Image (tube, rainbow, N blue to C red):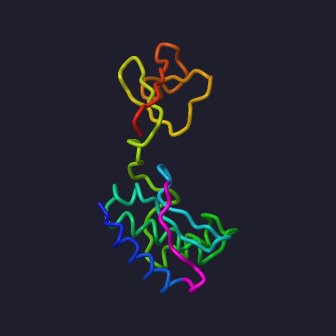
């Protein structure tokens, strides 16, 4: 689990090495997205929640991922130019993080008849949902019932 003071230091060092001084770093409150490159604000941000859950190496990789975006610009997306740049600066991951999300902050918890839990950060819609672990296709036998967490 990364220490937020360390994360701020790593970010400052990486920004100084790979971007210019018009870029800054911030923590954000994302629960499912590990990092973000905001081109308009020229800001690299990392989820404070996920940074505290993930290993130092995972957080460093998130920073490298976002800094590569800053280096190549918004139009590059996750295409070959971004991939080459990211690899050159030491990024070894994919286009998205596969680490754990901060589901303990999810306001909505769904449960299927077999006890599998599903987390949502926004209110589930009116459309019925079935458990994807129990059936690859929609199946009424595995309908998810939702409850709102009172303390989040």
Left or right, residue 86 beside residue 126? left
Does residue 62 appear left or right of residue 83 in this picture?
left
Q: Residue, x 50% and y 73% (percent of image)?
A: 25
**Residue furthest front in the image:** 151
Image position, residue 145 (x, y; %) = 47, 20
Towards the viewer: 152 or 24: 152
Residue 84, quarter of the rendered image = bottom right
Outermost residue on the right side: it is: 75
Q: Residue 122 falls in which quadrant of the image?
A: top right
Name the residue at the top extreme.
Answer: 141
Q: Residue at x 49, y 18 (%)?
A: 143
111 up-or-down from 31: above or below: above
In which quadrant of the rendered image does the C terminus lie?
A: top left
**Residue 21 sits inside the magenta stretch:** yes
Residue for point 50% across, 56% down: 96
Instruction: Judge whether residue 102 is colored magenta.
Output: no
Q: How many marks?
A: 0
> Residue 55, position in %: x, y?
31, 61
Identify the image quadrant of the N terminus.
bottom left
46 displayed left or right of 52: right
From which residue to which does the magenta span run?
Answer: 19-29
Where in the figure is residue 46, as x and y percent of width and height? 47, 63
Q: Reply above or below: 36 against 149.
A: below
Q: Give residue 42's position: percent from left, percent from top.
A: 62, 74
* Residue sitting at x 63%, y 76%: 72
């Amino acid at each position: 689990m990364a220490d937020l003071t360390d994360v701020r230091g790593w970010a400052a060092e990486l920004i100084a090495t790979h971007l210019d001084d018009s870029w800054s770093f911030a923590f954000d409150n994302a629960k499912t997205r590990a990092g973000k490159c905001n081109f308009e604000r020229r800001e690299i941000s990392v989820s404070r929640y996920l940074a505290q859950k993930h290993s130092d190496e995972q957080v460093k990789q998130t920073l490298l991922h976002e800094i590569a975006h800053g280096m190549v610009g918004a139009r590059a997306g996750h295409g070959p130019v971004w991939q080459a740049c990211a690899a050159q600066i030491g990024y070894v991951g994919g286009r998205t993080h596969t680490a754990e999300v901060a589901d303990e902050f999810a306001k909505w918890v769904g449960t299927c008849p077999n006890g599998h839990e599903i987390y949502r950060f926004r209110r589930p819609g009116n459309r019925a949902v079935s458990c994807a672990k129990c059936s690859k296709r929609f199946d009424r036998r595995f309908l998810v019932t939702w409850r709102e967490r009172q303390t989040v």
